[in-house]
Amino acid sequence: MKTQTTIRLDQNNYTQAKEILKYLGLSYSQAVNIFNSLIVCNKGLPFEVKIPKGETLQAMDEAKKLNGDFVTLDEFKK
């Protein structure tokens, strides 16, 4: 049985994620189902969640300075 849900996402991240998933041959819905299955299998998130180190914080600050001007998937593939 399937259920329908509504979530609020950052539009830019959502668009980029859909583009990446399409390249991988997955729909957004399929990816969410995979993520949910992994949560169930791991009895928690399928990755570590912790406070970032200084180097990571610096990289995050640099990314914020790009003001959303990221490389597209097509540019990345080149």
Image: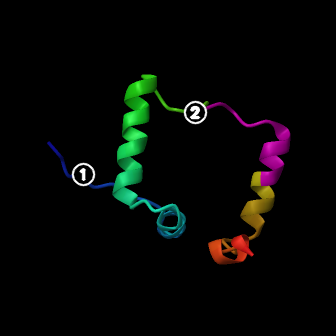
Q: Is residue 68 left or right of residue 21?
A: right
51 falls in the magenta region = yes
Q: In the picture, which quadrant includes the N terminus? A: top left
Q: Residue at x 43, y 59 (%)?
A: 26
Q: In the picture, which quadrant includes the C terminus? A: bottom right
Q: Is residue 41 left or right of residue 56?
A: left
- Three-letter amino acid code at the position of disc 2: Phe
Local SS, label 1: loop
**Which mark is first along the chain, 1 or 2?**
1
Q: Residue at x 39, y 61 (%)?
A: 27
Contact between marks 2 and 1 (CB within 8 A): the answer is no
Residue 58 x/y as whole percent: 83, 50
56 falls in the magenta region = yes
Q: Is residue 8 visible?
A: no
Q: Is residue 60 above or below residue 43?
A: below
Q: Which residues are magenta?
A: 49-59
| Residue nearest the viewer, comparing 75 with 11 | 75
Residue 2 x/y as whole percent: 17, 46
Q: Residue furthest left?
A: 1
Residue 45 x/y as whole percent: 49, 31
Local SS, label 2: loop
CA neighbours of label 1 inside 10 A, class few (<14), some (14 to 19), many (20+): few
Residue 59 x/y as whole percent: 80, 52
Colouring: rainbow
Q: Is residue 10 above or below residue 37?
A: below
Q: Which mark is residue 5?
A: 1
| Residue nearest the viewer, comparing 52 with 70 | 70
- Three-letter amino acid code at the position of disc 1: Thr
Q: Which mark is residue 47?
A: 2
Mark 2 against mark 1, which lies toward the viewer?
A: 2
> What is the C-alpha distance between the residues marked 2 and 1?
23 Å
Q: Residue at x 70, y 71 (%)?
A: 77
